[in-house]
Amino acid sequence: MKRIVTIQDISCVGKCSLTVALPIISATGVEAAIIPTAVLSTHTMFKNFTCKDLDDQILPIAEHWKNEGITFDAFYTGYLASAAQIDKVISLIESLKRKDDLVIIDPAMADNGKLYPAFDENFPKEMARLCAKADIVLPNITEACLLTGTEYREEYDENFAKEVVEKLAAQGAEKVVLTGAQFDGKYGVMLYDSKTKEFFYYNQEKIDAAFHGTGDIFSSAFTGLLVRGKSIEESIQIAADYTAECIRITKNDENANWYGVDFERAVPYLIDRIK
Ligand code: PXL
């Protein structure tokens, strides 16, 4: 059985980061090991959330695993609690990664032109150092702009999206998967492979609704599918369709929570698509 270690926070309520990564990776038929970067009472879109940084656990956990000979097919990182965690996560990957293991980085730090509340302006520069180590980096357009020092635009065209992903790849990542790529009346996911210099675009129907945690749902499904053995293009398509299905279900349920999507109800859809 393949095994992923995912490194991100545990928001006790909020349906994001580890509370979605664990069930979704499991649903893809891949083992999910974790390192919680912090424990929060809720995600940071709630007011007055608590946060305990688990920074001092990252390296001791890595050392124990190294001594036990524990290996992973992929290292998948999401929301990190502070800039100080970046070097620790880089050390962990350098210490445990074997030649063919995948490094997948979701620079979960911003959306809609704005950094998440817990981060200062220095954070994207630090996150860019981690993204430089990635086989695949999974930003939205806000994150791609912040990581490359590009001025954010609410509206942009295909050339702008291509330029930003090329710039990000030039900083070190081999492939860039830009989520929520919206231009020229289209909405979808753009893949750039810096080795072949090729682009792939998966066009989706745009659903008129925005929910927290959908980036984590896409990234978790994508990573599970890829490690399970799907091609990168197929992993993008199924993960994007699954995320859309989660949004559709949530939008159509007037009793759904405001703080996240009902990804649980679409798990059968995801499993059906894997068969
Ligand atoms: O979904 C990204 C995310 C993860 N973790 C925490 C967050 C957010 C987005 O707001 O606040 C704690």
Image (cartoon, grey):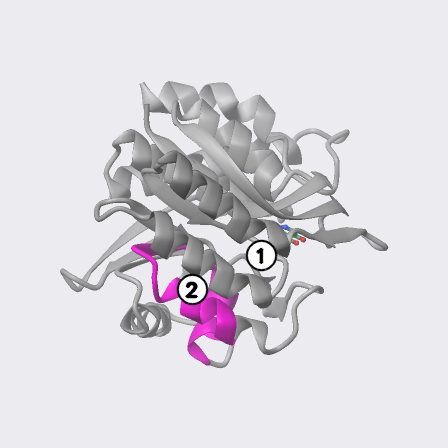
Kindly identify which numbered label has been placed on residue 90.
none
Give me the residue at 52% from left, 36% from top: 21
Q: Nearer the viewer, residue 112 or 221?
A: 221
Mark 1 surroundings within 10 Å by alpha-carbon count, few (fewer than 14), some (14 through 19), many (20 or more): many
Q: Please say whether residue 126 is one of the residues in the magenta stretch.
A: yes
Disc 1 to disc 2: CB gap under 8 Å: yes
**Does residue 265 lie above or below 173 as drawn?**
above
Give me the residue at 85% from left, 55% from top: 48
Question: Which amino acid type is marked by label 2?
Answer: Leu
Give me the residue at 42% from left, 60% from top: 90
Give me the residue at 58% from left, 56% from top: 80
Q: Is residue 217 left or right of residue 38?
A: left
Kindly identify which numbered label has been placed on residue 80.
1
Q: Please, which residue is most extreme toward the right here?
A: 48
Quadrant placement of the C terminus: top left
Quadrant placement of the N terminus: top left
Q: Evaluate whether residue 218 shows in this view.
A: no
Place of residue 240 in the rendered image (x, y in percent of width and height, measured from the top left): 42, 41
Mark 2 surroundings within 10 Å by alpha-carbon count, few (fewer than 14), some (14 through 19), many (20 or more): many
Secondary element at image label 1: loop
Place of residue 224 in the rendered image (x, y in percent of width and height, measured from the top left): 39, 34
Q: Nearer the viewer, residue 117 or 60?
A: 60
Q: Nearer the viewer, residue 203 or 42?
A: 42
Q: Please say whether residue 104 is one of the residues in the magenta stretch.
A: no
Question: Which stretch did the figure color magenta?
Answer: 125-149
Question: Which amino acid type is marked by label 1?
Answer: Leu
Kindly identify which numbered label has been placed on residue 130.
2
